[in-house]
Image (spheres, grey):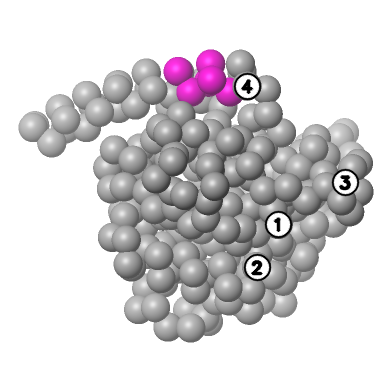
Amino acid sequence: MDYNQRISVAIVALEKADKLIDLVASIVPQLSETDEVLIVVDPRVQGIPSDMTLEVAWEIAQQLPLVRVIVNERMGRNAGYELAIKACEGDVVFLAEPGDLWKPDKVETVMNTLAASGTALVLHDAQLYTPKLGEGSYALLYAVFGAMDSGKETDLTAQQIHDSFVGSCMAFKVALRQFFLPFPQGVILYDQWMGLVAEKYGGVALINRPLISKTVGDGTDTLSSMLVINERHGEQRKLLKALKKRQKELDALLQG
């Protein structure tokens, strides 16, 4: 589909070879041949068993010309997303991780919302699947974090919005990265940092329905680290301090 904007999809794949192929297969049919998919993978570490994620990523890239593989020498999820976002060449960046599956209308819905809202970032809901709970475990992200009440966006509080900034439920205009990169030292929840910056420097639009299904609770997803409320709110206080510091730095840069 032609949106007159090039799309970049940034995937950080950490030991999830078995889920990477399915993720890419759900993404690529929604892209044009001028778009790109970046897969960031940690390097092999000598003496540590590998699940073949790097090899699978290279194989996907050989089969699909729009896929690029980047090895993250710094290692880790935050460093991986920072590297991927820096390398994106598109006008709009989508984030994803293995364990996600995109709904067939995700790209169309997000791109239309970005255009209609005029905001810098779009956030949407997700359908969550917890393997140990089986097929009956599908809940919605907004319901888990209490970020929606009766499906009315007007009922969102600032705290609830912050709770819902999950990377693979976000897409943003690439111009926004100048404000949130580099990620502040010590920040764990890179996606909530990006969301807070977007609120300050361009606005956020919410889509009140799931555009991905997301596996959680298997020990490898980013969302599991957000489920302890006290830890999550402590991290958010740290993010707000980092935002104030970044604002001062940007203001000084603009004035200089």
**Local SS, label 1:** strand
Q: Given contact means CB atoms under 8 Å apart, are the residues at marks 4 and 3 in contact?
A: no
CA–CA distance between discs 2 and 3? 19 Å
Which label's residue is closer to the chain start, 4 or 1? 1
CA–CA distance between discs 2 and 4? 29 Å
CA–CA distance between discs 1 and 3? 12 Å
Give me the residue at 89% from left, 43% from top.
Answer: 133
Question: For mark 2, does the 10 Å Cα neighbourhood hold few (<14), some (14 to 19), or many (20 or more) residues?
Answer: some
CA–CA distance between discs 4 and 3? 22 Å
Which label's residue is closer to the chain start, 2 or 4? 2
* Amino acid at circle 2: Lys
Q: Position of residue 75 (x, y in %)?
A: 64, 36
Q: Which residue is mark 4?
A: 229
* Amino acid at circle 3: Pro
**Residue 131: numbered disc:** 3
* Drawn side of residue 2 relative to residue 225, left or right: left
* Drawn side of residue 48 relative to residue 243, left or right: right
Q: Given contact means CB atoms under 8 Å apart, are the residues at marks 2 and 1 in contact?
A: yes
**Local SS, label 4:** helix
Give me the residue at 35% from left, 43% from top.
Answer: 198
* Drawn side of residue 117 relative to residue 67, left or right: left
Q: Which residue is mark 2?
A: 103
CA–CA distance between discs 2 and 1? 7 Å
Q: Which residue is mark 1?
A: 213
Residue 151 covered by magenta stretch: no
> In this picture, is 241 found above or below 200?
above
**Local SS, label 2:** loop
**Local SS, label 3:** helix
Q: Is residue 70 visible?
A: no
Q: Position of residue 212 (x, y in %)?
A: 65, 59
